[in-house]
Amino acid sequence: MKTLLVLRHAKSSRDDPRLDDHKRPLNDRGRRDAPQMGKVLRERALTPETIISSDAVRARETAEAAARTANFTGKIRFDPRLYNASPADILDVLQTMVKPEPRSVMIVGHNPGLEELVNQLTGESPDLPTAALAEIHLPIDGWRDLHGSIRGVLANLWRPKELP
């Protein structure tokens, strides 16, 4: 059994229209919400063993803030393949997990790919607003076994606006 945590990047700024999409930073709400998701991870003993994030600035800042608050002690892996990735792209990244193989992995990325991934793996279609965090339990022994036909369970879903 493996646990996949899916975190959509927090709210980003659109203040500078000249800024390339890949370089947009978090806005004030995003800088507040990202650590909240890290707190969820820490308080529920879900701090992942591995974090892999899109290399877009908003995803990077989300991953770093959540990791810091969750007391994550590893090194975040920033993977350009996760920028606006499809579910197939995300599965490819997960299937190349290095040894020792982690029991829990958190992916930080973008919609629509993340919502589509959650739907593909669980059969559920939850709305993932910015900074939403989904916990999926997968009936696999190794990440290389993760394919689009695997059916996991959406164990939990947290959205910033629903947190106390």
Image (cartoon, rainbow, N blue to C red):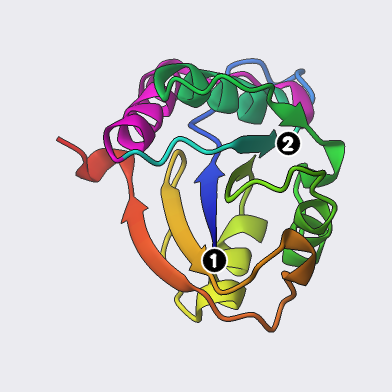
Front one among 57 and 156: 156
Indicate the secondary structure of the residue bearing disc 1: loop
Q: Which mark is residue 1?
A: 1
Hey, what amino acid is under mark 1? Answer: Met
> Do we see residue 108 in this rendering?
yes
Looking at the rendering, which quadrant does residue 34 occupy? top left
Marks 2 and 1, Cα distance to the nearest angstrom? Answer: 25 Å
On whether residue 70 falls in the magenta region, the answer is no
Q: Residues within 10 Å of mark 2 (few under 14, many from 20)?
A: many
Residue at the location (42% across, 61% down)?
127
The image position of residue 66, as x and y in percent, is 47, 25
In the image, residue 41 sits, relative to residue 92, either above or below, namely: above
Tally of numbered discs: 2
Looking at the rendering, which quadrant does residue 119 occupy? bottom right
In the image, residue 10 sits, relative to residue 146, either above or below, namely: above
The span picked out in magenta is 21-44
Q: Main secondary structure of the magenta part?
A: helix
Instruction: Check disc 2 and report the residue beneath it.
Output: 54
For marks 2 and 1 on the same chain, the one whose residue lies earlier in the sequence: 1
Q: Which mark is residue 44?
A: none
Q: Nearer the viewer, mark 2 or mark 1?
A: 1
The image position of residue 115, as x and y in percent, is 56, 62
The image position of residue 26, as x and y in percent, is 54, 20
Hey, what amino acid is under mark 2? Answer: Ser
The image position of residue 137, as x and y in percent, is 48, 65
Identify the image quadrant of the C terminus.
top left
| Residue 24 left/right relative to 37 | right
Identify the image quadrant of the N terminus.
bottom right
